[in-house]
């Protein structure tokens, strides 16, 4: 091959560059494997009775309110009237999330019964239980410094 801008044969340089690129990519994947192996922690989940059904929520202490996706609402709470919501949420990266609405649900956990708001958002994976519900249901969250122990009681 020729570099037509300079008129120099650089076929050896291309080969060396290609090898270096392949090595860099291989090292990047190896690095990601090591990092993700150390960082991956299974989510903390809670089984709650919501409107008489046993449902699993993922604990999100960064969320002020509890949310579910519109798809989850349609499959589990379709009979609940979707009310308008004035609340605007924000993601970790400060992106605004405007709920489709909210529903009133009866939540039972460990002999504690409360009627609370569940916010419905356009998309999402698992329903999240936020600090409002955790507090209302009597949970205490503590972080201990012994090897990052997290305790929810």
Image (spheres, rainbow, N blue to C red):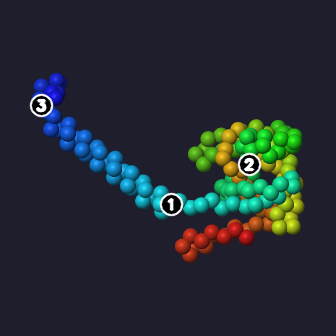
Residue 67 - label: 2
Q: Secondary structure at mark 3?
A: strand
Q: Residue 77 at what x, y percent from top left?
A: 82, 45
**Quarter assignment of residue 110:** bottom right
Residue 8 - label: none
- How far is the residue under mark 2 from the one under mark 1? 25 Å
* Closer to the camera in the image, 114 or 87: 114
* Closer to the camera in the image, 84 or 36: 36
Residue 70 versus residue 137 in the image, above or below: above
Q: Residue 151 at what x, y percent from top left?
A: 66, 70
Q: Which residue is mark 3?
A: 9
Is 40 situated left or right of 100 in this image? left
Give the mark nearer the N terminus: 2 vs 1.
1
Q: Which residue is mark 1?
A: 39
Q: Residue furthest left?
A: 8
Image point (74%, 40%), residue name: 70
Give the mark nearer the N terminus: 3 vs 2.
3
Q: Are marks 2 and 1 in contact (CB under 8 Å)?
A: no
* Closer to the camera in the image, 93 or 27: 27
Image point (50%, 60%), residue name: 39
Q: Is residue 88 visible?
A: no
Q: Residue 124 at what x, y percent from top left?
A: 67, 44
Q: Residue furthest bottom?
A: 146
Q: Residue 148 at what x, y percent from top left?
A: 56, 70
Q: Are marks 3 and 2 in contact (CB under 8 Å)?
A: no
- How far is the residue under mark 3 from the one under mark 1? 47 Å
Image point (62%, 41%), residue name: 95
**Quarter assignment of residue 60:** bottom right
Locate the N terminus by quadrant.
Answer: top left
Is 65 situated left or right of 44 in this image? right
Image point (25%, 40%), residue name: 18
């Amino acid at each position: 091959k020729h570099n037509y801008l300079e008129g120099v044969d650089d076929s050896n340089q291309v080969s060396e560059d290609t090898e270096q690129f392949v090595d860099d990519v291989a090292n990047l994947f190896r690095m990601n494997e090591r990092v993700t192996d150390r960082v991956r922690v299974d989510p903390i989940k809670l089984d709650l009775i919501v409107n008489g059904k046993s449902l699993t929520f993922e604990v999100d202490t960064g969320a002020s309110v509890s949310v579910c996706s519109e798809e989850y609402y349609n499959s589990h709470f379709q009979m609940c009237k979707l009310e308008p919501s004035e609340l605007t949420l924000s993601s970790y990266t400060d992106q605004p999330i405007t709920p489709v609405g909210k529903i009133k649900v009866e939540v039972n956990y460990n002999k504690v019964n409360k009627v609370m708001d569940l916010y419905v958002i356009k998309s999402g994976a698992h329903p999240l239980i936020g600090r409002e519900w955790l507090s209302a249901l009597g949970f205490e969250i503590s972080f201990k410094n012994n090897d990052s122990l997290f305790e929810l009681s």
